Image (spheres, grey):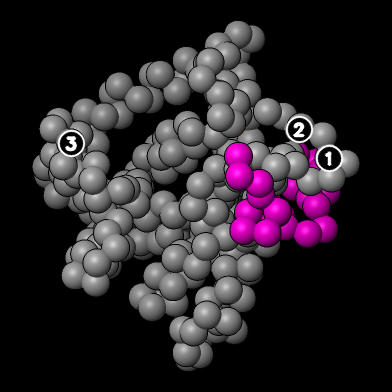
Amino acid sequence: MKESAKSRATFVFIATVVRPLMNLLMSKEWSGTEKLPPGGFIAAPNHCTEIDPLVVGHLLYNQKRAPHFLAKASLFKVPGLGPLLRATKQIPVERSTAGANRSLQVAQEVVAEGGAIIIYPEGTLTRDPDLWPMKGHTGAARLALEGGIPVVPIAHWGAHEVLPRYGRKVHLFPRKKSRVVVGDPVDLSAFAGKPLDKSTLIAATAVIMDAITELLAGLRNEEPPAERWDPFRQQGTSGRAERPGAGTGAQ
């Protein structure tokens, strides 16, 4: 990792706590890690349970790639947590123009240092009733196209059996398996030189989501739905509306 000494020390401290816990909770089956670019990149995983960041962060850290997540700006003000986030160059998400520029600057520093920026294109836990990736937000595509940063799709399956989506109870026994697959960097060359307007970003995001979904379909050995879940169109007020005729899936 091309991190500062302080950042490396903080990551090592966190890893000494998190890695044994993850190994206790789940066995792991990782594939495709050789596809991670040598320099900085955006990791774009699917999102189906609250412990997803630990799964993806574990994989990346074990490949000697420092994981950096986008985090709410308010978390940086929490005593104890804020200093850890700043020390490991986690990226604050702010609404103001000045704040957004600071976030972009931190992101560029992370990439220059060979780190991985983890962005969940869905923005939140998938609302798809069978846990397939839903329609994505355009942030990952914008950052990638603005900075010429590779986007690496990642799919994982199994962590939801430890902590189901929206669940509060951790299921320890029998021990579960976390399977993670890393894909080839997404080919976004078709969008090079185009204005970063809404239509371009939506199209680029769809390409990223297609890559994630294809990887997940391989892990699950199932066919994904023909139409991706759109939370703005299909979701009810509870955020848990189901596709007509669909089951509850592995929840």
Give me the disc on residue 249: 2
Q: Are discs 1 and 2 less than 8 Å apart at CB?
A: yes
Q: Nearer the viewer, mark 1 or mark 2?
A: 1
Q: Which residues are magenta?
A: 211-238
Three-letter amino acid code of the residue under disc 3: Val
Q: Tell whether position 86 is magenta.
A: no
Q: Quadrant of the rendered structure where residue 76 is? A: top left
Q: Is residue 149 visible?
A: no
Secondary structure of the residue carrying numbered label 2: loop
Dot label at residue 78: 3
The structure residue drawn at horizontal position 41% and vertical position 52%, both measured from the top left corner, is 118
- Classify mark 1: helix, strand or loop: loop
Q: How many marks?
A: 3
Instruction: Residue at 52%, 80% (x, y): give it.
Output: 198
Q: Residues within 10 Å of mark 3 (few under 14, many from 20)?
A: few
Ranked by sequence position, the earlier of labels 2 and 3 is 3
The amino acid at mark 1 is Ala
